Amino acid sequence: MTPGDTSSVAGAQPSQVLLIDCPDRPGLIHLITGVLLSHGANIVTNDEFVDSNAQRFFMRTEFVEAAAVESLAGELQATLPPPATVRIGRAGRHRIAVLATTEHHCLGELLVRHAHGELGASIQAVVSNHSTLSSLTERFGTPFHYVPHRGMSRAAHEDALEDVLSRYELDYLALAKYMRILTGSFIARYPHRVINIHHSFLPAFAGSHPYRQAFERGVKIIGATAHFVSAGLDEGPIIAQSVVPVDHSWRPNEMAQAGRDVEKIVLAKALKLVFDERVFICGNRTIVFD
Amino acid sequence: MTPGDTSSVAGAQPSQVLLIDCPDRPGLIHLITGVLLSHGANIVTNDEFVDSNAQRFFMRTEFVEAAAVESLAGELQATLPPPATVRIGRAGRHRIAVLATTEHHCLGELLVRHAHGELGASIQAVVSNHSTLSSLTERFGTPFHYVPHRGMSRAAHEDALEDVLSRYELDYLALAKYMRILTGSFIARYPHRVINIHHSFLPAFAGSHPYRQAFERGVKIIGATAHFVSAGLDEGPIIAQSVVPVDHSWRPNEMAQAGRDVEKIVLAKALKLVFDERVFICGNRTIVFD
Amino acid sequence: MTPGDTSSVAGAQPSQVLLIDCPDRPGLIHLITGVLLSHGANIVTNDEFVDSNAQRFFMRTEFVEAAAVESLAGELQATLPPPATVRIGRAGRHRIAVLATTEHHCLGELLVRHAHGELGASIQAVVSNHSTLSSLTERFGTPFHYVPHRGMSRAAHEDALEDVLSRYELDYLALAKYMRILTGSFIARYPHRVINIHHSFLPAFAGSHPYRQAFERGVKIIGATAHFVSAGLDEGPIIAQSVVPVDHSWRPNEMAQAGRDVEKIVLAKALKLVFDERVFICGNRTIVFD
Amino acid sequence: MTPGDTSSVAGAQPSQVLLIDCPDRPGLIHLITGVLLSHGANIVTNDEFVDSNAQRFFMRTEFVEAAAVESLAGELQATLPPPATVRIGRAGRHRIAVLATTEHHCLGELLVRHAHGELGASIQAVVSNHSTLSSLTERFGTPFHYVPHRGMSRAAHEDALEDVLSRYELDYLALAKYMRILTGSFIARYPHRVINIHHSFLPAFAGSHPYRQAFERGVKIIGATAHFVSAGLDEGPIIAQSVVPVDHSWRPNEMAQAGRDVEKIVLAKALKLVFDERVFICGNRTIVFD
């Protein structure tokens, strides 16, 4: 267990997490808890949710003392109505790469948390299309890979990126202000495994200078949204959002600083939820058992 | 079902709520869901929580289609480890009295929501130690009782209050800025059935002019706390809290207005949670399944 | 002064508000405060702001004891660089009409505040294209006008609306969930005098069932924006915004309730800012001296 | 100017900040702006506030192009009613030491911002009564001083601390979760120059395990307060506060993590306000021109 795993009570036997996603039907909780009991598993916490539109059932169970975790999952898989997903979670054992460009705020936040065991995952490498953040990354003893995109086709750049990433075993990619759009075919290699952060405004602004636009429109709130990246969609399922108040006297650069502060906290919070195995995806929504 | 019951999906069969509070032990969820299944109950939503300090198990289940609700509760009561509380909730059917003094903001909020079926309960009467709010109350066709306290002992005033309240069948008392301290013996007649709202500051201020003190201390946040009233305690289990930002330029009366705005929303939110049967009490804490 | 004017200190001489909007140039504050001094005006509070893009200067001054307010304004108008707007504010003396449709939450909020002198303006009438809210309005002794739109052209309906409104002397129109789009020619009769509230989401949703869409997208935050209505624009200058957190377990109707709660508070807050003469408009932005 | 000074517009002439605190009387703004004009100073932004209780006037002016800043300040000092404080601010040029104990979150936040020029001041050294944070500090090339307190009297430890601090020219001390109480005589060496962060709860909790108590009390909100440290007071003037929502399912360690997240953002925000010369102190309140 990494030092970042704060989800188990100090001194207690580490708990395991069972994750189930299957079609809804009466009696599921009774059935599942029966299988858990028969394996000697003692439930610590339990969350269920039925998405009544999708008619799907979601359950997250933390348990201790199960004798044979593999056979537990296998028995559930065989018993539940198909198509069912049954997983034993890997809370605290995920390996990730962080992709960044030139802004340090999100990467710095993740590196400091990682250095102190609070990230909930292990950063294997930082990859950037600029060399700007190599110094910050190396302060923390983390490998930094500079994969420039200048003068390359998008496909060639993504091949170079994939070439670096493939040297590691990775569960998730965290886009920490990575300012390149990734193609659907790249994203498809990491289904529901790429997490992004972006600023959010009311109303929304398209284009390249959002804080300038937010300033000119006189918005009173600036926010950030962390979400899974979906191929073929501008934006995938939302994991976490937050906002901060601003007013007419904030210059665009002050709005941008406030935006960076909220972005890094929301990204770290969303990643922790994912790494603690608290997030399910249902269509374009998330179910977050926090 | 009152029009305020927004917890059932329009057009669907109304759901019922099962509420269980008992000592924790392995296998409880399996046992309870088995009894529900055997009565033909179909679970719509389910929430459980184990308070690991108190070693108690809490469960809230919305279900439809159960044949015999009375025997369901009886069978569970007989089966669960004692001391267990098993209840079929009364969401949307609670009757309440509102106690107020002279401030209108909380009472007005409750009366408007009630008039439009959004309170989640039925206001039987408004009782006040001043006559100030009679006009507002009577605009909404609700009985108003003026129970003055001047020149009376605390015991005599509470007897007069109880005399009025006893004319109604009441599930809860909502203290909507009722500015008299109720004695432990009065509160004991309504165990876990009196809900209060008060302003909250960081740091806390004792004494009679809190907004003046908050101003002099230059607080940057003003809040409100809704809580159950406990005999012998300054303050019982917290149900809901919220805050709003203020700054040095706010005069004490402007801080007080901001305080009133947040108080009324927090009180209405806390009452709705209680009336929708979403709140359990465990020692001096609440478990809120929202 | 209406009882709603909370901006003057109890017992003190009522202050007046001077509002200036003119091209920026060096020395303006010195010039303006000199004219104030020469009229015996004593400044209570003073706010200035320069919009460096627009190169315009905004100043709001509360003062007491000026001998001749009319000549003060006249002298400033003659002295300041043109085009300048110099106004003595009407804080607490504005007259408004409220336009609503069938939802009661915003209208009820305004009526309760008005009944207790906290709105900061006087509601002359409520006008609606449905009769639903007549009962709520009449509880407060406020005239209610039913101006149906069925079977009428947009122009004919707006003529009927204007016919009713023209019976009153009105400073502002508050759109309290008025669900009809007003034409540019109607809005042009009330330049910068129509204030609207609408729900706000991250991301934004177009179309007729926004809470259904917000639910399906799994948003984690629901907000509201109060703004001036501009002819020819979807949305005019923003006055105030706020948000509340939601999660996957909120049904669309629960999200809608949360949205209503935040809408009514934001609308009341925005109106109070406008009625207290704290809001300037600069292009598509507001300057809010709060 | 350090790269952290974000308060000047890129490319523009750097602005200077004039700070005035004097007894209130009519005509002050006119008088001060007259002196500024006569020195050729062009006002960029201007904020004033009168504390009507203390009868004191506060003004913060950003200006450009003044010929002789020293004589400007001298002339104002000679002209304003005594006792007056007139200062030309040092935004972006402050030198600080950070005091910490074993928790990394606040220190890490300050070091990362400092490394990227966003702190608004220059960290000269980190001093701690434990050696825990030496590695984090040294990653950023900042001197770390370990000043243990074990086996020493409080006076002896503070002498050792002062011995280290006196090697640097320091404008402020930032207490970044420094868990030792500093004596009045130590604080008196840095009047209004020591800034602290602490967790804040509604209600407040005394004692050594606040998050355990907050958990047991079932609070729904966790906050942080940044404030100046005053000799002889538990708590000096508040600079900034913020909160985050929690619920019954948060374990004490999860509440503590949420508390750390809000603490570090509030501390960094408060320091930036102070370093940008936006904070005045008036008795036990701050005036924050943000």
Image: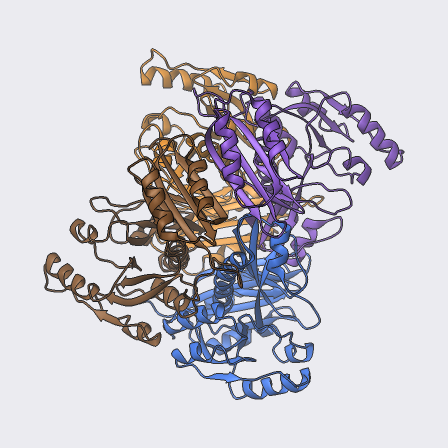
Chain colours: A blue, B orange, C purple, D brown
Q: Left or right: A83 with respect to B257?
A: right
Q: Left or right: A101 with respect to D117?
A: right
Relative to B156, residue D158 above or below: below
Between A277 and B246, the one nearer to me in the picture? B246
Relative to C101, residue D150 above or below: below
Relative to A142, residue B247 above or below: above
- Looking at the rendering, which quadrant does residue C170 occupy? top right
Q: Residue furthest top?
A: B151
Q: Position of residue B133 (x, y in %)?
A: 51, 19
Between B53 and C185, the one nearer to me in the picture? C185
Q: Left or right: A290 with respect to A196?
A: left
Q: Position of residue D244 (x, y in %)?
A: 44, 52
Q: Position of residue B187 (x, y in %)?
A: 37, 29
Q: Residue at x 68, y 84 (%)?
A: A155
Q: Quadrant of the N terminus of chain B?
A: top right
- Looking at the rendering, which quadrant does residue A137 occupy? bottom left
Judge whether residue A27 can be spotted in this image: no
Judge whether residue A241 can be spotted in this image: yes
Between A109 and D275, the one nearer to me in the picture? D275
Q: Residue at x 77, y 37 (%)?
A: C187
Give the tally of numbered discs: 0
Q: Position of residue C289 (x, y in %)?
A: 53, 39
